[in-house]
Image (cartoon, helix red, strand yellow):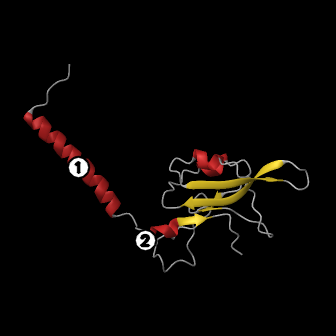
Amino acid sequence: MEKKKTYLGKIASAVESLATGMGVTGKEFFTPKVTECYPENRATLQIFNRFKGVLEMPHDEEGNNKCIACGICQTVCPNDAIEVSSEVVEDAASGKKKKQLVKYEYDLGSCMYCNLCVEICPTGAIQFNNGFENAVYDRSMLNMTLNINKK
């Protein structure tokens, strides 16, 4: 059975707790501070490779991307931030029918940067870049179409 503290024991416990807290605060008070002077330091700003900024769909020189319009990224997205529109077309060379990407829409305002879409993509067609300046006045500007080549 737990022993009850006396009145003086409670006061001693409170003073000990206060001293511990003040010790942590005092230690932090005397440590050197590091302040990033953003946006003045944009030229020297270093962003880690693991940082997830904005979803992008890389294109090659001819404007093609690797997306096969499978829709797995849309299915796995917990916030429905991705919408893949596709159509079935007949391949001229082989005569087989296959899916072709029509529109790949991404809502940055709904994205929670969980990286599930990037990890599940079978062709590696999408990735996060390091862009972090996403402040806009109109929320509709956060809706992007990624499969358009931006040459």
- Name the side, left or right, on which 123 lies relative to 134: right
Q: Residue at x 46, y 71 (%)?
A: 135
Q: Nearer the viewer, mark 1 or mark 2?
A: 2
114 or 31: nearer the viewer: 114
x and y percentages locating residue 145 in the rendered image: 61, 65
Question: Alpha-carbon distance for marks 1 and 2?
Answer: 29 Å
Q: Which amino acid does the dot numbered 2 rest on?
A: Thr
Say which mark, if any, is on residue 36: none
Foreground pick, 97 / 37: 97
| 105 is higher (above) or lower (below) than 40 | above
Q: Are marks 1 and 2 in contact (CB under 8 Å)?
A: no
> Which badge, 1 or 2, comes first in the chain's sequence?
1
Q: Which residue is mark 1?
A: 19
In front: 116, or 144? 144
> Along the horizontal axis of the image, is 109 left or right of 84?
left
Q: Tell me if residue 8 comes above or below residue 114 in the rendering.
A: above
Q: Amino acid at mark 1?
A: Ala
Q: Who's the residue at 64% across and 52% down the image?
A: 118
Quadrant of the drawing holding the C terminus: bottom right
Instruction: Give the image location of residue 32, x and y in percent.
Output: 40, 67
The reply to whether residue 124 is in sight is no
Figure quadrant of residue 22? bottom left
Q: Residue at x 34, y 59 (%)?
A: 28
User: Closer to the camera, 61 or 130?
Assistant: 61
Question: Could you tell me which quadrant the N terminus lies in?
Answer: top left
Which residue is under mark 2?
Answer: 35
- Figure check: 10 above or below 70: above
